[in-house]
Amino acid sequence: MNVLVAKIAKIPGRAAKRLKVKRASKGPAALRRVLLVEDDPVLALALEDALLRGGACDVQICATMKATVDAFEKGVRPTAVILDVHLADRDDGWAIAELLGLLGTKLPRIVFSTGSPEDIPKDIAEMGPVFVKPYDADKLVEKLVCQRTAGIFARLRRIRAKKS
């Protein structure tokens, strides 16, 4: 049993094996499939609850970089990703955003969650808003729903403007 499952089992009203929640109702397009990468079980559950209240249809929680990569290998293609920058098994959780860019699919909406925003490389931090812990989970969900993702042309214009 992994650490996250063991910790969730100790929280009243939560099933130990419930790491994936599905909901039949339709929610905002940005919240259809949310991948929540967070190693703090209390924060993960608070974010999951906020996402479900915000209309998320499918929330999958991964507590480690390895679990996240395994999810991608199994075909998980989220419409939104919330990334904890400092995970228990790796200190570069932001690399998941970089990996998503390499997968070649449409880039999901990305939100970074961290206590040290300066640790995120600038080009990666531009992929989505950065929330500094502690933060209001409902505000994160609101930002996720309202966030406009920059298309490839907008990103190229930004790169060209930096070089000028």
Image (cartoon, rainbow, N blue to C red):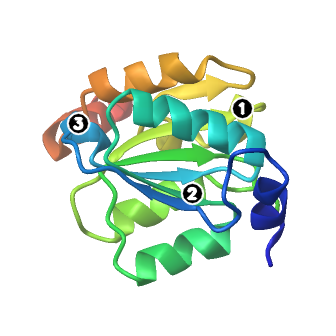
Residue at 26% across, 39% down: 30
Q: Nearer the viewer, residue 123 or 9?
A: 9
Image quarter of residue 78: bottom left
* 39 to 112, vertically: above or below: below
Element carrying mark 1: helix
Which residue, given by chain and number where applicable, does mark 3 sit on?
A: 27
Whole-angstrom CA distance, mark 3 to mark 1, is 33 Å
Residue kind at label 3, given as amino acid type = Gly
Q: Position of residue 81 (x, y in %)?
A: 44, 48
* 92 to 56, vertically: above or below: below
Residue at 42% across, 42% down: 110
Whichever of callouts 3 and 1 sits on the residue coming sooner in the sequence is 3
Which residue, given by chain and number where applicable, does mark 2 sit on?
A: 61
Q: Position of residue 96 (x, y in %)?
A: 53, 60
Q: Nearer the viewer, residue 91 or 66?
A: 66
Which residue, given by chain and number where applicable, does mark 1 sit on?
A: 118
Q: Are marks 2 and 1 in contact (CB under 8 Å)?
A: no
Q: Quadrant of the C terminus?
A: top left
Q: Position of residue 72 (x, y in %)?
A: 43, 75
Whole-angstrom CA distance, mark 2 to mark 3, is 18 Å
Q: Is residue 155 left or right of residue 43?
A: left
Depth check, mark 3 against mark 1: the one in front is 3
Whole-angstrom CA distance, mark 2 to mark 1, is 25 Å
Q: Is residue 152 left or right of residue 68?
A: left
Q: Nearer the viewer, residue 91 or 12?
A: 12
Residue at 36% across, 35% down: 163
Depth check, mark 2 against mark 1: the one in front is 2
Residue kind at label 1, given as amino acid type = Glu
Q: Quadrant of the N terminus?
A: bottom right
Q: Are marks 2 and 3 in contact (CB under 8 Å)?
A: no
Residue at 79% across, 59% down: 9
Q: Are marks 3 and 1 in contact (CB under 8 Å)?
A: no
